[in-house]
Amino acid sequence: IDWQAAPLGDTGFLAAHRQTAGRGRQGRQWLAQAGDSLTFSLGLALDLDQVPGGGSALSLAVGLAVAEALEAALTTPIGLKWPNDLWWQQRKLGGILIQNSIGAGNKIDSTVIGIGLNVNQVSWPVEVPNPTSLKAETGSDFDLFLLIKKLCNCLEIRYLQLKNAPGQLRKDY
C-alpha cells in the first residue's frame, strides 16, 4: 500500500484477510496463512519529535499493547524482543514493523505500524525459525474479529499513555 497516495487524516486502519507480501525488518518476508493470521496496519499522523522518547517510546507502547491483548489467551507473559518481536516461551508469536514518512522540513509527519500475529496457524515452512501461534500453544481456535477488537482497545490505551504519561511505559515494561 502506498500510504502517501492514500491520505489517512489523523488515523487509518487496514486489516488483511489474506496477506501475500508481508514483510518484517530489513526486508525479511512475513508469512501468513489466510484466515489463520492477523495482519493489519495502523496509520497515525504523528509528529514523533513531540513524543517524549520518540520512536523508541512508540515501539514500546505498541509492543506492550499487543502483548497485553494476547496474554489473556496464554498462561504466562509474552516477551518483547526489542524492537519488534513478540515471543512466548522462546518461540515467535508475532512481529511489529513501524515505518515513518518524512514530510516538510525533513520531519516525520506520519507513522505506519504493521502488526503480524500467528493466531490459528499450526504449520509453517521449514525455513521459519521457532514459530508458534495462539492455537498451537492452547489447542483452541480464536475469533480474529474479537482479537482485533481487543488489540485496538489495548493500542488506544497505550497510545493515550504515550501522549499523556510516557514515563509509565518503561515502568510497565
Image (cartoon, rainbow, N blue to C red):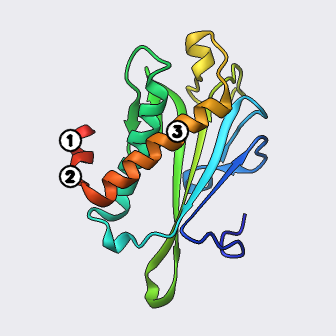
Residue carrying label 3:
151
> Horizontally, is 84 left or right of 94 in the view?
left
Name the spot of residue 50 as percent of width and height, x first.
32, 72
As drawn, the label of residue 171 is 1
* Figure check: 139 above or below 96: above
Front residue of this view, candidates 125 and 150: 150
Could you classify mark 2 by the number of other residues whose Cα lies within 10 Å: few (under 14), some (14-19), or many (20 or more)?
A: few
What residue appears at the point 63 percent right and 12 percent down from the top-left corner?
Answer: 140
Front residue of this view, candidates 139 and 159: 159
| Mark 2: amino acid | Gly
Of labels 2 and 3, earlier in sequence is: 3
Q: Is residue 57 visible?
A: yes
Front residue of this view, candidates 121 and 90: 121
Name the spot of residue 168 as percent of width and height, x first.
22, 47
Name the spot of residue 124 as percent of width and height, x first.
70, 26
Does dot 3 land on a helix, a strand or a loop? helix
Could you classify mark 3 by the number of other residues whose Cα lies within 10 Å: few (under 14), some (14-19), or many (20 or more)?
A: some
Real-space Cα separation, disc 2 to disc 3, in angstroms: 22 Å
As drawn, the label of residue 167 is 2
